[in-house]
Image (cartoon, rainbow, N blue to C red):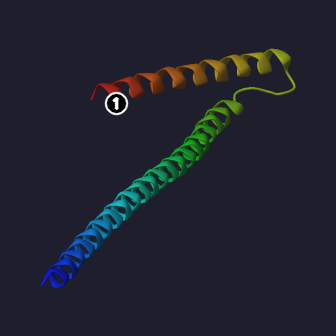
Amino acid sequence: MEAKETIMNSLKKAATDAKDKITEGVMDAAIEAKEKIKNSVKDAAREALEKFQNSAIEYLGKKAENLIRGLINKQRGSYSVEDNESYNKFVAVISNDIDQMGQDLIKQGRKLLQE
């Protein structure tokens, strides 16, 4: 009878050890999967943010270009390029308009940040 008990105890111990090893392996795999998923999400978020920033910068650049083009076209007819005095006034007016536009944008930005 002792041999039978020894065999049964050995089988129970082997089953318990196997269960523990499987549990440990599953836990390790779950931890590794969690890390990979977390890193993938971080990478995807970082990439999305970079794309958004790049498209926002591109959009704002085009918007600024259009605004300045509009200012120049608005003032261009009033001044003669051949006349230095007229050209200097043109540059001064455009500079003031751009400065005012910048101040207005700063005010609008501050209002948005306060909301």
* In-image side of 15 versus 83 (left or right): left
Residue at the far front in the pictured view: 2
96 and 48: which is toward the camera: 48
The image position of residue 11, as x and y in percent, is: 23, 79
Question: Which quadrant would residue 10 be assigned to in this image?
Answer: bottom left
Residue at image location 61% in from the left, 18% down from the top: 96
Query: Is 25 situated above or below 98?
Result: below
Categorize mark 1 by other alpha carbons within 10 Å: few (<14), some (14-19), many (20+). Answer: few
Question: Which quadrant would residue 75 be assigned to in this image?
Answer: top right
Residue at image location 49% in from the left, 53% down from the top: 43
* In-image side of 10 versus 32 (left or right): left
The image position of residue 88, as x and y in percent, is: 77, 16
Q: How many marks?
A: 1
Q: Secondary structure at mark 1?
A: helix
* In-image side of 97 versus 21 (left or right): right
Residue under numbered circle 1: 112
Instruction: Locate the C terminus and report the quarter of the image it occupies.
Output: top left
* In-image side of 49 versus 12 (left or right): right
10 and 19: which is toward the camera: 10
The answer to whether any part of residue 77 appears in the image is no
Instruction: Locate the N terminus and report the quarter of the image it occupies.
Output: bottom left
Question: Which quadrant would residue 21 be assigned to in this image?
Answer: bottom left
30 and 95: which is toward the camera: 30
Residue at image location 59% in from the left, 37% down from the top: 64
The image position of residue 90, as x and y in percent, is: 72, 22
Residue at image location 59% in from the left, 23% down from the top: 97
The amino acid type, in three-letter code, at marker 1 is Leu
Residue at the far left in the pictured view: 1
The answer to whether any part of residue 38 appears in the image is yes
Query: Is 48 situated above or below 79?
Result: below
75 and 31: which is toward the camera: 31
